[in-house]
Amino acid sequence: MNSNADALRNKLQNIRRSQEKLENSFAEIQTELRAVKPRMNNAEQRIGDVEDRIMEITQTGQQTEDQTKKHEHNIRELWDNIKQAKLHIIGIPEGEEKDKQIENIFEEIIAGNFPNLKDTDFKTQEAQRSPNKVNPNRPTPRHMIIKMAKVNDKERILKAAREKQSVNYKGTPIRLAADFSTENLQARREWQEISKALKGKNMQPRIFYPARISFKIEGEIKFFFQQTKAKRIQQ
């Protein structure tokens, strides 16, 4: 009987010792966790800061890209506005301006080709060859560029040239053209293909400055800046 009681007491003592060890281990774990928690919070904060910075950089990059595109568009628009009143005369032989000023050559072209405009008092602001220097490797003469005081005057001359179709200077065929940026020149060339298709359907297309088109559809005149939309409608 005593031996059974002793055995039971020993088991209880062992259980208490194991319990004390578990309590001590648990206390140590809690202490370690309390020490680790600030570091984890700090790490989480740093990770959050990095993520916020990445997001900020991404947004800034997108904003910068958008701003760059906007500035490029504004520059092209400004440049086209500057060029809007300029007229190119293409095909005048080199050296003609030695005997007479370019303005006088321009007046002769108007008088000789467009009798209905010869009495119009066109005001010019600048007249020059472009580029300024002759390139000996270039087989064609440099363009003469006339900057008109009024955009409407330039448009009247171009309209008359389109209607006449054949323009000459001293018997030499020449061409009158508007002055556009590279981007708008490309856009206008692409509009020409669409315009041909629209003419075939009797939709009365017209290309406007700097690069947009109008045509008649369902009895209405509609304007388009984007070629994809115009193509979808005319198909």
Image (tube, rainbow, N blue to C red):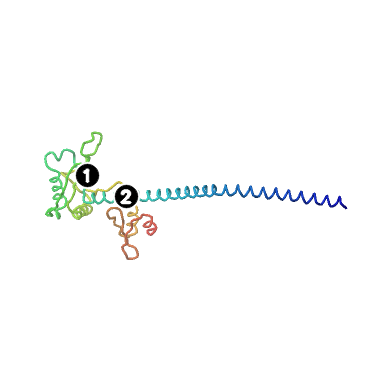
Q: Circle 2 — which element?
A: helix
Per the image, the residue denoted by label 2 is 71
Q: Circle 1 — which element?
A: strand
Q: Residues within 10 Å of mark 1 (few under 14, many from 20)?
A: some
Residue at the limit of the structure toward the bottom, as seen here: 219
Residue at the limit of the structure toward the top, as seen here: 136
Mark 2 touches mark 1? (CB < 8 Å):
no
Identify which residue is drawn at 15% across, 54% down: 117
Q: Nearer the viewer, residue 18 or 62?
A: 18
Q: Residues within 10 Å of mark 2 (few under 14, many from 20)?
A: few
Amino acid type assigned to the residue bearing label 2 in the image? His
- Apparent side of residue 19 relative to residue 51 in the rendered image (left or right): right
Residue 129 image position (x, y, % from top left): 19, 41
Per the image, the residue denoted by label 1 is 90
- Residue 75's place in the image compared with 135, above or below, is below
The quadrant of the image that shows the C terminus is bottom left
User: Which picture quadrant has residue 142?
Assistant: top left
Q: Nearer the viewer, residue 71 or 131?
A: 71
- Apparent side of residue 234 relative to residue 76 in the rendered image (left or right): right
Query: What distance separates the C-alpha of mark 2 from that of mark 1?
Result: 32 Å
Count of numbered marks: 2
Amino acid type assigned to the residue bearing label 1 in the image? Ile
